[in-house]
Image: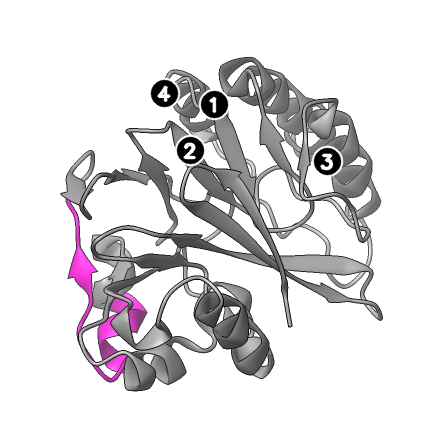
Amino acid sequence: MAHVTEIAPDIFRLSAYNKQANFQFNSFLVRDAEPVLVHTNLRAAFGEIRDAVAHLIDPAKLRYIAFSHFESDECGSLNDWLALAPAAEPLCSVVGARVTVNDFAIRPARTLAAGEALATGAKRLRVINTPHVPHGWDACLFFEETGRTLFVSDLMGHNGDVEPVITGDIVGRSRAYTAAQMTGPMAHSTPYTAQTKKIVLDLAGLEPKTLAAMHGSSFAGDGAGVLADYAVMLEETIGRPMRGQ
C-alpha cells in the first residue's frame, strides 16, 4: 500500500515508490464533505492508491478527480476511479477537457474558469491555468485556499525515496534533478517559454504554506520564497541554456 502522511489539515500524501526508477509518485487526498483525489497515479498503481484512500474515506464517495495535465501519472487510472466512485467527476483545465479528457474519460470533466474556486465543504479549490508549466498546453495547478496548500504537480520534482515533508532546501534538490535531466531520452520535459518565470512568480504571490509535490518530498514553510527561488533556478538551468547564454 502507498505510504500515507497528513501534510496539512485533512490533506494526505499517498506515496508510491518505484524502486527501478528511484522515483516517488504521489497522489493527494483532500478529505472534506466532497472529497478530492489530486493525481490518480499510474494505472498500474490503482490498487495501491485505492487501498490508501480506503484507510481515510470510502473510495466510492470521492467527488472529484483532479489533475494538472494529461499524462499517465496524472490521470492514468482516471476511468478506474470514475467506475469505482459513481458521483466522481474529472476536474481539469478547460483546454484539458476540450482536447483530451472529454474524449478519454467515461464521464465529462468539470472545468473551472481561470481563478474560479470550487467549495468542497470546509475547503475551497481554486484552479490556476499554467500553460506549459510544468509541461503541456493544458496544464493547470490547484490551490486549496483555506489552508493555503498548492498542488504543484511536477514542479519541485526530485528523485529518491525521500521523506514526506521537508522544511529545508527543496529547490536545491530540484536543481540537481533538473540539471541531470538536461540530456538523454527524457530531456526537455519542462519547456521554458516567455511566460514561465511570470507564471511561477504569480504562484509565489499566492503565498502558499504547503507545496504538495507529485515527485519527492512536499515542502512546508515559506512557499512564496521557495517559488521565487525556483523561478530563478528554472531560468538558470533551462532558460539560459535554451537561449544559448
Which circle's residue, 2 or 1, is located before the other in the chain?
2
Q: Is residue 226 left or right of residue 21?
A: left
The answer to which quarter of the image holds residue 16 is bottom right
Between residue 55 and residue 184, name the one nearer to us: 55
Residue stretch in magenta: 99-113
The answer to which quarter of the image holds residue 207 is top left
**Kind of residue at disc 1:** Lys
CB-based contact (under 8 Å), mark 2 and mark 1: yes
**Kind of residue at disc 2:** Thr
Q: Which residue is mark 1?
A: 209
Residue 58 location (% of width, % of height):
35, 72
Q: Secondary structure at mark 2?
A: strand
Residue 188 location (% of width, % of height):
66, 50
Which marked residue is nearer to the observer: mark 4 or mark 2? 2
**Kind of residue at disc 4:** Leu
Between residue 205 and residue 37, name the one nearer to us: 37
Q: Which residue is mark 4?
A: 206
